[in-house]
Image (cartoon, rainbow, N blue to C red):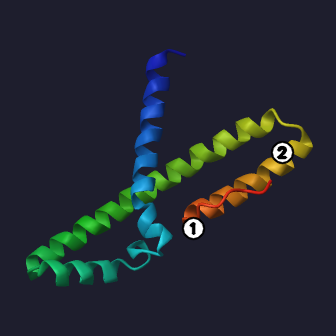
Amino acid sequence: MSRGPRKMGWLVMAALWGIVLAASPALAKGGWHKDPAKHLEYLTKKLTLTDEQRVQVEQAMTDYHSRAQILYEQLESVRQQKHARIKAVLSPEQQEKFERLSKKHHTRWWRGKKTESKD
């Protein structure tokens, strides 16, 4: 395999992680992603949007959500592939521990907690 595609893969992963990390403060606070209508109302009020602007902002938010969902699904697929490759080199005991560690890390990361694992 040439370095070009591999380097491109890393660039794609870096971009995906950038998107996820940029969104993480909102995710950690249970942000607007759970209620886009509240986000739209907030922007409408704070920016004093006209009706026309509101429609355009709402469309931008809808487009973003659709694209972000696709990227999240791609990121999850890559994460699963990485875990499969790691588990392939581990003993059965290590695989069990790796699963526990992975679940703890994933839960903590998405909830925005910065605690260290005790494992």
Looking at the image, is 71 positioned above or below residue 114? above
Residue that numbered label 2 is attached to = 95
* x then y, percent, for residue 84: 72, 41
Q: Which residue is drawn at 65% across and 41% down?
A: 81
Residue that numbered label 1 is attached to = 111
Q: Do the residues labelled 1 and 2 touch (CB within 8 Å)?
A: no
Tally of numbered discs: 2
Looking at the rendering, which quadrant does residue 118 occupy?
bottom right
Looking at the image, is 96 positioned above or below residue 1? below
Q: Distance between the residues labelled 1 and 2?
A: 24 Å
* x then y, percent, for residue 31: 42, 74
* x then y, percent, for residue 93: 91, 45
Element class at badge 1: helix
Looking at the rendering, which quadrant does residue 90 occupy?
top right
Drawn side of residue 44 relative to residue 2, left or right: left
Q: Which residue is drawn at 16% across and 70% down?
A: 56
Drawn side of residue 99 relative to residue 35, left or right: right
Element class at badge 2: helix
